[in-house]
Amino acid sequence: MINKIKIIYGGSNPIQEFNYEIIITNSDSDIYRKTGKYKGNFKKTESKKNIPNGEGTWNSIDGDYAKGTWINGEFTTGQVKYKYKNGDIFEGLLKESMYDSYGEYTYADGDYAKGTWIKGEFTTGEVKYKYSTGNIYEGRLVNGKYNGDGKYTLANGDFEKAKGSS
């Protein structure tokens, strides 16, 4: 999960489009860098570097993007698509630098969560979860709990309908 996107380099020319590198921290405290192009409003820092400030769009060479509001070089609110180095992909809305509102998270192994995120936590929507045992649950979450009809497939291929809430 994205905890923070922050610019760590901006060009020094007073233009509205420039290359830069961002630093991204996820919930596991993994830190990694991505290079991309920012276009939008900016301000100059004391060291004469341009940093995003206001409305703008960032696009990486591998298809990631962030479009929305930047404050002092940090992306805080707007539409994002982000592919993590492990292959997981999140597409949705960020608010205060966290997943918030509707989003889709697809795991590299094919699992997914589509629905509502509140302050970085998935709470309501369609899910497919694969457990370490190999069993798979496909169904719906409401307020963080399984709800309604679902399908629970065992690692050996047998399956059963899941009903009710847990």
Image: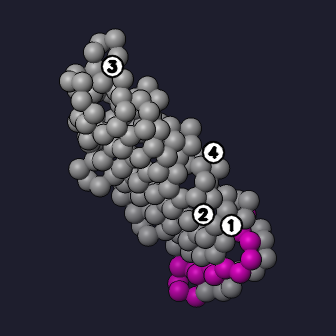
Q: Decide: few, some or many residues near mark 4? Use Cα within 10 Å; few <14, some 14-19, many ≥20.
A: some
User: Of label 1 and label 2, which has the lower sequence position?
Assistant: 2
User: Of label 3 and label 2, which has the lower sequence position?
Assistant: 3
Q: Which residue is at the far top? A: 46
Give the residue at mark 1.
141
In the rendered image, which quarter is residue 160 located in? bottom right
Distance from label 1 to label 2 (Cα)?
Answer: 9 Å
Dots 1, 2 in contact, CB < 8 A: yes
The type of residue carrying mark 2 is Gly
User: Of label 4 and label 3, which has the lower sequence position?
Assistant: 3
Q: Decide: few, some or many residues near mark 2? Use Cα within 10 Å; few <14, some 14-19, many ≥20.
A: some
The type of residue carrying mark 1 is Leu
Q: Mark on residue 44?
A: 3
Give the residue at mark 2.
115
Distance from label 4 to label 2 (Cα)?
Answer: 13 Å
The type of residue carrying mark 4 is Lys
User: In x, y percent, where is residue 74?
Assistant: 44, 32
Q: Residue at x 41, y 58 (%)?
A: 88
Q: Residue at x 67, y 62 (%)?
A: 124
Local SS, label 3: strand
Q: Residue at x 63, y 59 (%)?
A: 116
Q: Mark on residue 119?
A: 4
Distance from label 1 to label 3 (Cα)?
Answer: 45 Å
Q: Nearer the viewer, mark 1 or mark 3?
A: 3
Left or right: residue 115 versus residue 86 is right
The type of residue carrying mark 3 is Lys
Q: Quadrant of the C terminus?
A: bottom right
Q: Decide: few, some or many residues near mark 3? Use Cα within 10 Å; few <14, some 14-19, many ≥20.
A: some
The answer to whether residue 27 is seen in the rendering is no
- Count of numbered badges drawn on the protein: 4
Task: Please provide the residue range marked out in magenta.
Answer: 145-158
